[in-house]
Amino acid sequence: MSTLKVNRIEAYSGSSVEVVGLAATASNALWSGISGIPAGLVSGSYSSSMSTRITAQENFSSSIDLTFATDADLTNLSSSASTARDQIATDYIAADTSLSGSASTARNQLATDYQTADTTLSSSLATDISTNADSISTLNGKTLVSSSIAGDAQGQIKVNGVNVNVLSLQTTSNPTFANLTGSNLLVSSNLTVQGTASFQYLQSITGSAKIIGDAYIILNNNTPTERYAGIAVYDSGSAGVTSSLEFDGQNNDWFYEYSDDGGVTTDHGVVIFGPEYSTKGSPTYLTSNTVPKSTGSHHIVDSNISDDGSTITLGSNTSITGTVVATGTTLVSGSAQINLASATGIAATASFATTASFALNAAGGLTAQTASTSLTMSANIAYVVTGTAAPITMSLPASPTVGDLIKFANMDDRATLLGRNSNNIMGLAQDMTLDIEQVSFDLVYVGPTAGWTIYGSRALS
């Protein structure tokens, strides 16, 4: 049961006030100090013991005041605690300074000891690695990494034959590489190189055409270290067959190279270009129907020979060192002349023909030879038989060639025998006796049947 002390009730309403838990009995309540109590509010008598109890309670409260500290006591205690705190701080600083110096010394010694131990350990490890290099792939009999680590798909590496996905590079990723190298690199889709790329050998297993979306393919040689550069074609369907178009950095030539035995033997040819010109975009071409000629360098130019498909035209003086053979019936037509002044002979065929306007130069151009004794004649010489003491024999060549010409004149009044030398004369296997003085003619060998044929026979008197 608790004690309730009510100093006063200031107001009330109604006819009664009920104090719950406090019965108005002499042993529980003291009403003697309450004045003006309405009638019917409190009933019962007051005991003197109540007053005694209240007095005892007041005496107990006074003893409590003596037991607990006063404000002065608390002030003195706070001052004492502050002094103790300051002393603790001073002691701590002194101890910390001393400890820091000791710790610094210990730290430096520890660093020295660590560096010495690290150097010794590194040296020991290097020795162990060098000594056990052959066993580095295994550890306690367990294989660490075997075979290639290349995975079977993009975003994978292979560890001991097992594909392992690399989380940052999945099979559907589109990676960007700052530097990309590899001996076997498969790109199944587009590869975009925004910087520079170096490919030692670019091979396509599938597909027949490669599209390079740039204006130029730039190849590099470095003379004399790398003298040649170019485009090489490897025929994968024919073993060992290659063909290349290459640039020679030393001679500044483009040339062709071919091999059918894998490069053991090769043949080459210099590339020849058309007429040279100095302004890019303003080319010079060969003239239509003109036969080109070499300039002795990389270029060819127009010659003085043209061919329109039916006529070959020589636009300058022509020097012939060999034999001119005509398959038609006319060798020279029109008003042209053949100058024999510097020639050593004329080759003609059985179909040799002249026109009314054709004329041999009066100078003749053949080597002339006189004869007064028997001899064997040679082709392309003009022979004149002069006065002789007795008849002589002028034998024709034993092995003539079709077109061989001999000019013959008999200035002697004695009979001269023209010996056939095993070849026919005018289709007859007979020698020919010249019994007419001062006669001249041409002999042309036209073949084994007709033999030597006589042209332009006439008497000089």
Image (spheres, rainbow, N blue to C red):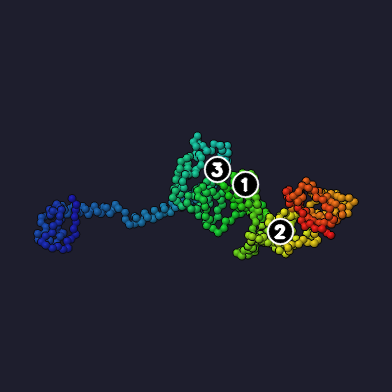
Q: Residue 370, located in which quarter of the rendered image?
A: bottom right
Residue 318 x, y percent position in the rendering? 73, 60
| Residue in the image at 45% along x and 44% along y | 164
Tag 3 secondary structure: helix
Q: Nearer the viewer, mark 1 or mark 2?
A: 2
Q: Which residue is mark 2?
A: 331
Residue at mark 3 to residue at mark 1: CA–CA distance: 62 Å
Q: Nearer the viewer, mark 3 or mark 1?
A: 1
Viewer-nearest residue: 210 or 141: 210
Q: Amino acid at mark 1?
A: Ser
* Residue 120 appears in view: no
Q: Which residue is mark 3?
A: 118
Mark 1 Cα within 10 Å, few/some/many (few <14, many 20+)? some
| Residue in the image at 61% along x and 50% along y | 244
Marks 1 and 2: CB-CB under 8 Å? no
Q: In terms of sequence position, does the residue under pointer 2 or pointer 3 come before the other?
A: 3
Q: Amino acid at mark 3?
A: Asp
Q: Residue 249, located in which quarter of the rendered image?
A: bottom right
Tag 2 secondary structure: loop
| Res 259 label | 1
Residue 190 x, y percent position in the rendering? 48, 53
| Residue in the image at 78% along x and 55% along y | 442
Tag 1 secondary structure: strand
Residue 47 x, y percent position in the rendering? 13, 53
